[in-house]
Amino acid sequence: MHSQTDLRKVAFLGDYPPRRCGIATFTADLRNATAARFPDLQCPVVAISERADGYAYPPEVRFEIPEQDLESYRRAADFLNFANMDVLCVQHEYGVYGGPCGSHLLALLRELRMPVVTTLHTILRDPSPEQRRVMAELVRLSTRVVVMAAKGVEFLQTIYQVPDSKIELIPHGIPDVPFVDPDYYKDRFGVEGRNVLLTFGLLSPNKGIEHVLQALPRIAAAHPDVVYIVLGATHPHLVREQGEAYRLGLELLAKKLGVETHVVFMNRFVESEELAEFLGAADVYITPYLNEAQITSGTLAYSVGVGKAVVSTPYWHATELLADGRGVLVPFAAPDAIADAVIGLFEDEGARLAMRRSAYRLGREMTWTHVAYRYAEVFGRAREARAATRVARARARTLDQRVQNLPPLRLDHLVRMTDQVGLFQHAVFTIPEYSHGYCTDDNARGLLLTTMLEEMSEEVPERRGLASSYAAFLHHAFDRGRGRFRNFMGFDRRWLEETGSEDSHGRALWALGTCVGRSRGQSRRAWALDLFELGLEPVLEFTSPRAWAFTIIGIHEYLRALSGDRLANRVRDELTARLMDLFHRVAGPDWPWLEEIVAYDNAKIPHALILTGRWTNQDAVFRQGLDSLAWLADHQTASEGHFRPVGSNGFWRRGAEPARFDQQPLEAHAMVSACLEAFRSTNDRVWFTRARRAFEWFLGANDLGGSVYDATSGGCRDGLHPDRANQNQGAESTLAFLLSLLEMQGMQNALSAFENQTDLAT
């Protein structure tokens, strides 16, 4: 299935029960089948209401649109965008939505940031100019359009010039009921021992029921036990305009024809479970519609799917569905032909049974469970198509247009995410998410950033306050009794664990070592030195290669100021040897990596080896770092030339394909930092190009062609899904961007200074 497992939220738009109409029933059946088939998928509903007072909707309806209120359509688009829906599934019928030919719907679709899958319940062969315009725009705004009959595919291609690649054919869903003899249900309706004809659906003059009534005298003469059940309420629009005049006219016609004792009018709307019982009791189902221009009939689909013998006029859907012996077609408005067909089926039980079995076999592909699965496949393809379209548009712009200069440094969002305790882990959009509290990982990164700002003499008024908060958090996080950092703290300031992860400990040492090596404040350096020394030796008990790598980088920073520290040098040598040993034991010609999986923060491992190899004159270590980084960079470069980090949804296991999503800012920062270190170590310009490529991922040079960095907030979105950026802007993502930006600025400043010196020398 195409990306189905990535789906989290699919919204459904259309009429919805308790509104009584076929579209409402379809929307509910499809939504409920999808929710049942994929229990982890959220399936909210946006309902269209034609009544001023609305309806008492069930809880899955999250937003209600008054049919004629244009602004409500735009507000619904905001709701769907803010809720980060993966896909919107639209049920389209011209009469459902407000505006000329339902054009209000277009105002909603134009504002959406997600793919749209639209099911077309009506496709007109001879549309008016306004209907054609609305349909053309609807198709343009939809990523995929679903039709329920091959005739619909033909019309879209020949009348509306819709490309085949955009069209999906999925049958109308049906309930999954057993194949049973009609006599099993007849006693429930008081028709046991009788031959039962059935028509159901909302009554209106285009249904042709009067022609079945006119056929009844001949049918009753041949089979006096026949009963014709007309099941369904009068269409609400007809009731508003004419009351029950049409139904009363049918009743008068039955009396005039002398067949009133053979007809039962059931003036009510029935739910799916009761409808299945009515269908079960029918010997023959009849759809006597008067016009061929019906591309879809839910009532016909239900009848065929449950294995009924069907007599129908040859409207488009019936001609297709009843082919190959699955039903009998009769001319429009032809009572004698209806009578012949019904009598023939009553008198040839073998033919009737064969027809039922043929219909039931087809119906196994039409059950709602199967249809929901098919829709989920389309939802996945729609996400992929939407992403591909965005990328194509982005690639139409040149790189110089997309990224001309480094953006200015903004700490607005970082300040918003920090309180007197420390840095919050997560955000909902740009709002700090208190419920997830704080963590050492992010506060260590925050201290690293503020220390780099101090070294670069960046005059940022907020820096000192931020640095103090992050340092205080790390100080409190360290458990001196255990010699370990705790990681997660709740908003109530209580630690959620006794000992944090090895990775969080390693990141803390990285930040502390940087503080010792780069901070200009003597008191801050003294504090960091004490904590660094206390936390260093426990790392020798760790098993995480990333924790080793973070610690090695922290030791390198520490040794910038205190190169004679024997403990730091000993720990660095030991951790480096362990990394090299893993490479020797795991790596091979086709997999030059130290684990059986390429997971997260990957470039930090070669980064650590490059540093150690260079500064301890270990050429084998240095070369291992460069080679593994080059391999990693090559395999994280798309064929189009942009950076494509290994996705966190599965990572990359040896012998398998890399996960493409979700792409994380953390991985882009690791690549930027490692490639800049490789550039400093080799003076090979290709490494600067690779660093720049990874940085440009933040700014739009990525699989979706959209910026991950949010220039309006100063934050960074939490990664790339297959079809959009995650709109939440957490601490890890924001710091990944800010650290990458500072490192790129530092390198560009160094390059500019070097070029200026070269110009002066010449």
Image (cartoon, helix red, strand yellow):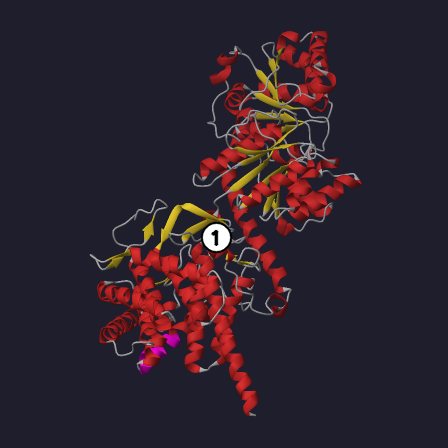
Left or right of 495? Residue 518 is right
Viewer-proximal residue, 638 or 272? 638
Q: Residue at x 54, y 55 (%)?
A: 713
Q: Is residue 638 visible?
A: no
Residue at the limit of the structure toward the bottom, as seen here: 762
Hey, which quadrant is residue 138 in on the image?
top right
Magenta span includes 620: yes
Residue 476 pos. (x, y %):
30, 55
Q: Residue at x 52, y 61 (%)?
A: 410
Viewer-proximal residue, 508 or 221? 508
Element class at badge 1: helix
Residue 208 pos. (x, y %):
70, 22
Residue 730 pos. (x, y %):
45, 53
The residue wearing badge 1 is: 416
Height in image: 757 above or below 89? below
**Residues shaded magenta:** 617-627
Q: Is residue 355 visible?
A: yes
Magenta span includes 152: no
User: Which quarter shows the C terminus?
Assistant: bottom right
Give the residue type at disc 1. Arg
Height in image: 343 above or below 318? above
Q: Residue at x 50, y 52 (%)?
A: 726
